[in-house]
Image (cartoon, coloured by chain):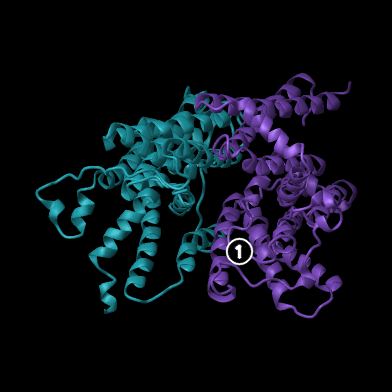
Amino acid sequence: MSARAKTALLQLAASAAAVALAFLTGALIMLLVGVNPLAVYSALFEGVLLNPYGLAQIIFKSTPLMLTGLSVAFAFRAGLFNIGAEGQMIMGGCCCALAGFSLKGLPWLIHAPLCIIAAMAGGMLWAALPGYLKAKRGAHEVITTIMMNFIAAALTNYFVMARFHEPETVHTASIMPSAFLPRLAALSSFFKGSPANAAFFIGLAACALAGWLLWKTALGYEIRAVGLSPDAAAVSGISVARKTMSAFLIAGALAGLASVNFVMGYKHYFEEDFTGGAGFMGIAVALVGQNNPAGVLAAALLFGALSHGTLVINALVPKDIVLILQALLIIFVITFDGIARRYAAANFGEKA
Amino acid sequence: MSLDGIFSLALLSQTVRISVPYVLAALGATISETGGVVNIALEGLILTGAFCAVLGSHYSGNPWVGVMAAMTGGIFVSLIHAVVCIRFRANQIISGLAINILAAGATKFFLKLIFHSSSNSSRVAGLPHWSFFGLDRAPVIGAIVSDSLILAAALLVFASYCLIYKTPFGLRLRAVGEHPECAETLGVSVYFMRCAGVMLCGVLAALAGAWLAFDQHQFSADMSGGRGYIALTAMIFGKWNPLWAALAAALFGLAEAFQIQLQTVGVSVPTQFIQMIPYVLTVVLLAGVIGKSRAPAADGKPYPGEE
């Protein structure tokens, strides 16, 4: 077996061990408070994986996570840490809803794509400033994107409350039906009662496209080169500032796109906290998915399943156990991943 | 009511009350990052501190036990950050985010199990008030100078400054934050110093949480409400110096208090714009428009580094 294959196998084993240990620790916590973990886990398994509604909910819940995960992973390939997916998703959702309810009388074929573009543009806009500050001023993107998250939340909150809110509610007006994304339930009765919608296919397409962009195009090659070593990339004639900016804009567009699942496919309006923390969870998804699109897809499905699981197990144990499980998963993944990488570097001579 | 009613003692007392958790958490972050460990787990530490404070005083009936419990909780949660980031050299930002999720989940989990509510705990008594020379009976400021946690916070600002800049411990801490290889060569244990920094941060941020809990006489879900991140901006704004960080924290507190006072006299500034101030200022600062704020050189970098 080649050193590279051995390393990949070892990393996969490390991820599996991390998942197992997270569930084991979760079980210990449940035992400690006198809850039978086996009952909880089997309810989780049955409620989520063994019934059509559960599967449809996984699709619905994993769609935004896929896109925010992809956003974080894409930026990570350029050596950038995008903590700002949350804010970018919020701005994307706001722009998407704005285009959705203010443009009237357009056919679906024009209106829906316009709203999708608006969502991407909103995310891009919010990623542009941290990207610029990183590329031109060397400002650390972690701090600036955290700040941009809070500014996005406050700003959209102001606009929704002061300008665009529907009387008696805390959300904007509904978008036009010409901007609705079709529900999967319209395609097959399998998805009956679930808000799963066509945004899932947008997510899948984005995964494929991101993979193609990163590994099959010159831009992707240059972005990865900058991520591996900015100095080496600069010496070989790649503009580090430019690639940093491009990577940030694409990451922003992906995070903005994550909002269409809710705004165009589910509630058809913008409201505060509609993200449900998907922007932050995207960081965990990218991490567990090893920053590659196929991994992100798998991790998004896992996190989507856990997220739906909160409803299934709430009768047995406080549903917040799922947050604990997700946090433990992240902690074990980063710990084990480092151990595996160092072991591989020392024993197979492979730098992963 | 005239506008000068705004610049009153009420404004001062409101500013102090809002600033205390910012100041305490910002001091913690400053100490941790001086040693080279980025700690964005402040939010989780505040929640942990608040919950443990309520738990401790709920079971013992003594708020001081609550304070001890908060500090213990802070140390315990910091231990996770230390093991993951220092021992296993994992990414400090991701660990911090995970701890924030963990604390949010765990506090709500135990809130439901212990207090059978998904929103708040039962009521607990606050800390007893000191009385120096009857000062506690002075109007408005009496409540400030007689509150033990406010006094502790004020003392801790100077204590943190002295710790970092006037003691051998502080010198070593700064050394491992600036140049860990060099410090190790001189016989300073990078592991030990960084762990100590992270633990101190845990204690201080947990105290911030205890203050919140005693101020509101209860724990409520997600009561940290982004304060950990404001403390983080105060640290950056204060250029990683405890005195300046505390001043920045007080400034952000003043802005919020000012907005509340404006509202009471009927001038309404949208809350959202006041809330944005610390974040916008930090972005502007990082853009290099108003001077430079520089982190310790090895801040966020694991030791030993990857080859």
Task: Give the percent coordinates (x, y) of residue A220.
Answer: 83, 50
Which residue does the image show at 19% across and 45% down from the upper left? Answer: B129
**Please, which residue is most extreme toward the left here?**
B133
Residue pointed to by mark 1? A271
From the viewer's perspective, is residue B264 above or below residue A134?
below
Task: Give the percent coordinates (x, y) of residue A37.
Answer: 60, 27
Which residue does the image show at 50% across and 53% down from the upper left? Answer: B293
Relative placement, left or right, of B284 versus B174 is: right
In depth, the one of A73 and B67 nearer the eye is: B67
Q: Colour of chain B?
A: cyan
Which residue does the image show at 90% across and 48% down from the upper left? Answer: A216
Mark 1 residue element:
loop
**Please, which residue is most extreme toward the top here?**
A347
In depth, the one of B16 and B248 nearer the eye is: B16
Relative placement, left or right, of B86 versus B61 is: right
From the viewer's perspective, is residue A124 above or below residue B226?
below
Chain that the image shows in purple: A
Task: Give the percent coordinates (x, y) of residue B19.
Answer: 35, 54
Task: Give the percent coordinates (x, y) of residue B25.
Answer: 41, 45
